[in-house]
Image (cartoon, rainbow, N blue to C red):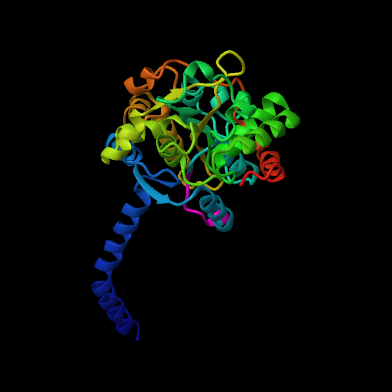
């Protein structure tokens, strides 16, 4: 009996041992493969190029899942501990604040990030860090507006600009963050008065994205658009000649230079609460905050570097230096709900 059993066992091992060994090797390879998994709402070729260079430099594979910021935040909530995401990358500090507030991010410690990213562009408790900066400016028709007549966001709510202002809808997070910043600086009552004044001065009911506002300026629908600077870079470098013409016919004006500074926002990232590759996520964050990656953000995507040791691109420098609002961007998230309420109260569509 024992002899038969031994023979059977030998046969089984003869047949399956190579398979078991091969499977074991594959598992070993799989478990030792260095990866970092990203959820991101950014959709730029620049970002993928940076991830590819990171993999080339470190051997760490970057897996990317793209969707809107709200979809990604909801997905992180649903997946909870089972999520594969190690890093959340989104445009807008308000959304980063929201992810932190929902317990979807974790605080990290990195001397490199503390050196590379200024305090006002990162979470005060190290839950997220800004990687690129956008300024929300006035874009005006060169043939109809003398830039010397422009001054502040607050001035755009005065009667002299009635029927001349173009801006996208109140559901847009960039507008919500702009109003949130004005709440932080001027208080709720003044912020509400400003929003009401803008509604009164709109050239049309809000529609379209930032690029569409510039196109409406050139089409003569309005004279001044509130929009982010990097969209002008996109227009000027577009493959569509008509978009290039639009970019060439508008000027960029940085408001509030004599007062509270121009509103800025960030694209940034935070390590997820249940990251399974936390160390790799931090390595990627540090890489993206470094001089090489920051220069690529500025050159290829027309965003201002968050790292102050890196110069802006020649295009950005051609618009001149500017003073930015001196607030911690966490306040954009803290005041977001009130900003949305104010938009509803003044009927900003």
Q: Quadrant of the N terminus?
A: bottom left
Image spot of residue 248 (x, y percent): 33, 28
For image coordinates 25% across by 78% down, the residue present is: 11
Residue 323 position (above or below residue 339) = above
Residue 345 position (above or below residue 224) = below
Whether residue 311 appears in this view of the structure is: no
Residue extending furthest toward the right: 189
Residue 150 position (above or below residue 162) = above
Of residues 207 and 217, which is closer to you in this image?
217
> Residue 2 lies in what quarter of the image?
bottom left
Of residues 303 and 99, which is closer to you in this image?
303
> Residue 257 lies in what quarter of the image?
top right
Residue extending furthest toward the top: 258
Residue 342 position (above or below residue 325) = below
Of residues 71 and 341, which is closer to you in this image?
341
Q: Is residue 246 magenta?
A: no
Q: How many marks?
A: 0
Image spot of residue 339 (x, y percent): 67, 39
For image coordinates 42% across by 16% down, the residue present is: 320
> Residue 260 lies in what quarter of the image?
top right
Q: Is residue 216 left or right of residue 203?
A: left
For image coordinates 55% across by 57% down, the residue present is: 79
**Magenta residues, start to end:** 80-87
Whether residue 325 appears in this view of the structure is: yes
Image spot of residue 254 (x, y percent): 50, 21
Image spot of residue 131 (x, y percent): 46, 31
For image coordinates 61% across by 23% down, the residue present is: 155
């Amino acid at each position: 009996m024992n002899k038969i059993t031994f023979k059977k066992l030998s046969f089984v091992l003869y047949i399956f041992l190579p398979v078991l060994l091969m499977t074991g090797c594959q598992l070993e390879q799989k478990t030792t493969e260095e990866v970092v998994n990203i959820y991101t709402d950014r959709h730029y070729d620049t970002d993928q190029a940076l991830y590819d260079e990171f993999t080339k430099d470190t051997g760490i594979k970057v897996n990317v899942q793209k969707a809107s910021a709200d979809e990604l935040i909801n997905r992180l909530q649903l997946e909870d501990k089972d999520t594969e995401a190690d890093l959340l990358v989104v445009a807008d500090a308000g959304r980063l604040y929201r992810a932190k507030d929902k317990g979807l991010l974790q605080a990290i410690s990195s001397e490199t990030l503390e050196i590379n990213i200024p305090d006002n562009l990162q979470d005060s408790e190290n839950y997220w860090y800004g990687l690129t900066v956008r300024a929300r400016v006035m874009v005006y028709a060169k043939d109809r507006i003398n830039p010397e007549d422009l001054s502040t966001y607050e001035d755009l709510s005065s009667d002299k600009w009635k029927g001349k202002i173009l801006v996208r809808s109140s559901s847009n997070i960039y507008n919500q963050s702009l109003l949130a910043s004005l709440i932080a600086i001027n208080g709720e009552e003044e912020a509400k008065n400003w929003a009401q004044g803008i509604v009164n001065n709109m050239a049309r009911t809000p529609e379209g994205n930032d690029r569409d506002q510039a196109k409406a300026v050139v089409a003569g629908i309005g004279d001044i658009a509130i929009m982010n600077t990097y969209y002008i870079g996109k227009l000027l470098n577009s493959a569509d000649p008509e978009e290039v013409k639009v970019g060439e016919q508008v000027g960029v004006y940085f408001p509030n230079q004599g007062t509270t500074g121009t509103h800025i926002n960030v694209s940034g990232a935070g390590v997820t609460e249940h990251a399974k590759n936390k160390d790799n996520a931090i390595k990627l964050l540090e890489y993206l905050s470094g001089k090489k990656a920051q220069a690529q953000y500025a050159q290829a995507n027309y965003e201002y570097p968050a790292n102050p040791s890196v110069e802006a691109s020649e295009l950005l420098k051609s618009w001149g230096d500017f003073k930015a609002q001196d607030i911690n961007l966490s306040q954009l998230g803290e005041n977001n709900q009130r900003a949305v309420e104010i938009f509803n109260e003044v009927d900003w569509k």
